[in-house]
Amino acid sequence: MSTSLGGRVVGGTASYIDERTGAAKAMRYGLRKVFPDHWSFMLGEIAMYSLVILLLTGTFLTFWFVPSAAETVYTGSYGPLRGVEMSEAYRSTLDISYEIRGGLLLRQIHHWSALLFVASIAVHMFRVFFTGAFRKPREINWVIGLTLALLALIEGFAGYSLPDDLLSGTGLSFARGMILSIPIVGSYVSSFVFGGDYPGEALIPRLFIAHVLLIPALLVGLFVVHIMLVALHKHTQYPGPGRTEQNVVGYPLMPVYTAKAGGFFFIVFGVTVFLSTFAMINPIWAYGPYDPSPVTAGSQPDWYMGWLEGAIRLLPGWLEFQVFGWTFSFNIAIGGLVLPGLVTVAAFMYPFLEAWVTGDKREHHLLDRPRNAPTRTGLGAMAIAFYVLLWSGGGNDLIATHFRTSINDITNFLRIAVIVIPPIVYVVTKRICLGLQRRDRDLVLHGMESGRIVRLPHGEFIEVHEPLSPQDAWQLVQHDAHRPLPLPEGADGNGVRRPGTRAQRIRAKLSHFWFEDRVEPVSPAELAAAHAHGDHHAVTEEHTEMQKQLQTGRH
Amino acid sequence: MSQTQHGSTDGTLAQRPGLPEHAPQIEGTTAAPTLFENPGLPPHVHRLADTDPKAAKRAERQVAALFTLSILGTLVFLVSYFAVDPQTPVYIPLIGRTLLQNFLLGLGMGCGIFFIGIGAVHWAKTLMPDEEVVEERHYLRSTAADRDGAVQALQQGGEESGIGRRPLIKATAAGALGLFGLPFIVALRDLGPLPGDRLSRTMWKAGMRLVSDPEYGPIRAEDVTIGSVFHVMPEGIDKVHDKLEQKAKAAVLLMRLDPADIKSTKQKAWGYQGIVAYSKICTHVGCPVGLYEQQTHHLLCPCHQSTFDVTEDCKVIFGPAHRPLPQLPITVDTEGYLVASSPFHEAVGPSFPERGHR
């Protein structure tokens, strides 16, 4: 204990708190907690910090925003709108932008941060998916994370609908069209949501309380569980020398991660502020107040709603029909309700499906390199292709105007492409993964091309291949070799069908789909054989040494 | 991980083979005959600042300089907040016209925050220990004793409560718990009125004048020239209390075509000398159909690109909409102003389930 005054005060305070909470025990453990280092682990951090920035700037905005559709006449300092009738919500958003010093900046930070929040969640999910970080014991956290992603979408949509400008109103009329398309009860749901006729005065206060209380409470609560589970599971790590399923290699929370991750918060925040300063976003004064009769060409939702917008644009009109006098608008309902529902269910189910197919009940703390899981990587790429095509469908008008092409051609092309291209992307991605795995094998077996050409005494030229270091080689040979499950016997010896074989057959078929095409990692035997063969590179003592180091069989 | 650790009892994953229920169960993966051995952490390479005190001093100064930039940034924010006029515009290259104060506030706040981060990360990367630390993982699964204990505690609690022996309490408690949430669901009923037939009705009545939006002036037939388009509302819409709700249904587009171009007799009959009025609300999801191509007489919805052919009674010729835009029958009154000759004959706007009901 320091004898300086400062030291005594700190020590005294710490002792006071510990005697009442016992916090020292948790701190002793927590402060030395180890986190592995990798750039892709920072994607989730961006989402976490964006959430903090959103809570901070959002709180400021609530001090001035008036969540009311009541009509008023603008008298503020933005000339072009003076004397125009508008809602209190739009008027107060104008005031935040023009009368409150720094208000515009806060609004812009809030909006930019919301876009980054959803984007970083999406990319973080890609990382988790492609590296297999959702496997046991982290399946529950995948489900929580996906719920967080959905909440973030809804929260974002509720947020940008609040200012009641022409663009956000157009988005709400779109949402209302979607609600009306719910079979049988659509008009009732719409009437309940909007408190009667559209647009009505009820929606803005309702959206507001959802946006500032209901959804944020859920977001923060689930996020806390999400991060507590990360701490409990300890972070996953990429495979590498010295990294095993039983350890975690990295830097301790105190001091390195406090400085790095804490510093990264300020970097994310700082970059968001710079973006907000240099790049104007959502200039609501240019759109004007909401009025149901005008609309601007090129109306676009925020990026994360673009794929649903695309689905709505691409679905053909004949999906609307009448049965027994009831109108069913599947040209809207499929895009607005069925598609997001199916995508969500598929994403929720994936970890459980993969675990069932592989029959893998082990804990996984070492991540997969995406190439070592070709089918999973292919499926992920396929999903991304589907998403991106729908998303570009949401911007078909902008593509048409920017590239001077026919909007009809673009739409017709995308209608087919959305179905045809994703499977092609699946096949191509899987082949690329298998190719990369073959290259890994080649590197391990034959070493790296050194660029050194040597002429042998009998006149033959060879390129000398340098063997990999044991550490580099380990990276390429450490993964599992999955093989497809054998097809079960459909009947026992007496010709009686075995119960449960149907599920097993499906499982075996899926397992073949997953692992039929595969490239297995180099085994020590293969390496030894390659070196004994030693046809096109000189076998040196280094090889034998490496073999010795790599080959002391662990199981 | 070497084999010697497999028999240890420190609770780490290494003991997996010792506990049958923890044993790795992976089907379809036949382990290769021999596996390679993990070579262990690579040797640590020291940084310049670890070995050279001068480099360390230099790094220290760099970190201090970055933190100083942050302090300056915050000062720029504070000075701009109080000393710069909020309304002064400024031209910044690459950004364009913006408000000077807002720009300086953002620049100052951004620097104030950003350089703390850069400074902290630089500090961590150059001066804090960079030797990796290894922490062991432990199984999350509780010990068998704990699991049995939990089950026992639950069973004991159940027995002590007597819920199994007293079915009357069990049934009534289940009923009470099942019902107590109902009032909260029922209370949602008054979120809004029942839809009624409001989705099928608009303000339009026979004899009601067509007025231009947003000036609300009546329109003479001769003012509507071929190629022009009028955004039209029913007369008196600016006086009603639910103006936006009525506008959302009653908006109409007025166009004049050469009567020879009109292919539908119903369309001709409901128009006036080639002047036709159609609902402006898209039959897809209800955006205003705002774009009119004069030459082709196509109406295009800018939201989802549904395209309607005005010469063919506004039938859908492209895009996701299914139904034609409803036509408003019009004529002229005694003063020569355009009026509706009847209300819309069908519901306008996006489809809803009861739309086809009479």
Image (tube, coloured by chain):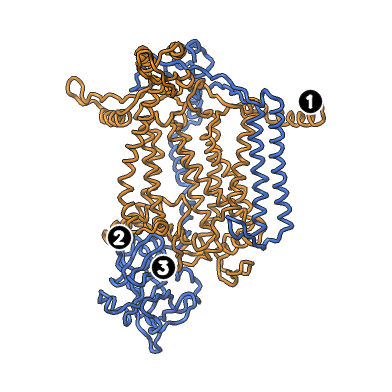
Chain colours: A orange, B blue
Where residue A483 sits, quadrant-wise, is top left
Query: Closer to the observer: label 1 or label 3?
Result: 3
Towards the viewer: A287 or B108: B108
Front-most of B112 and B31? B112
In the rendered image, the vertical position of residue B92 relative to residue A472, given as above or below = below
**The numbered mark 2 sits on a residue in which chain?**
A
Disc sitting over residue A326 in the figure: 2
- In the rendered view, would you say A504 is above or below A540? below
Q: Are marks 2 and 3 on the same chain?
A: no
Q: Position of residue A93 (x, y in %)?
A: 59, 60
Where does residue B319 sit, x and y in percent of width and height? 33, 60
Q: Earlier in the sequence, mark 2 or mark 1?
A: 1
Instruction: Tell me which residue sits at (46%, 49%) in the image.
Output: A304
Label 1: how many Cα within 10 Å (few below 14, some 14–19, many 20+): few
Is mark 1 in CB contact (under 8 Å) with mark 3? no
The chain identifier of the residue carrying mark 1 reads A
* Residue B80 appears in the figure: yes
A216 horizontally vs B203: left or right: right
Labels 1, 3: one chain: no
Taking the spot 36% from the left edge, 33% from the top edge, the residue there is A432
Residue A16, disc: none
Q: Which residue is mark 1?
A: A2
Tell me which amino acid carries mark 3: Gly
Q: Nearer the viewer, mark 2 or mark 1?
A: 1
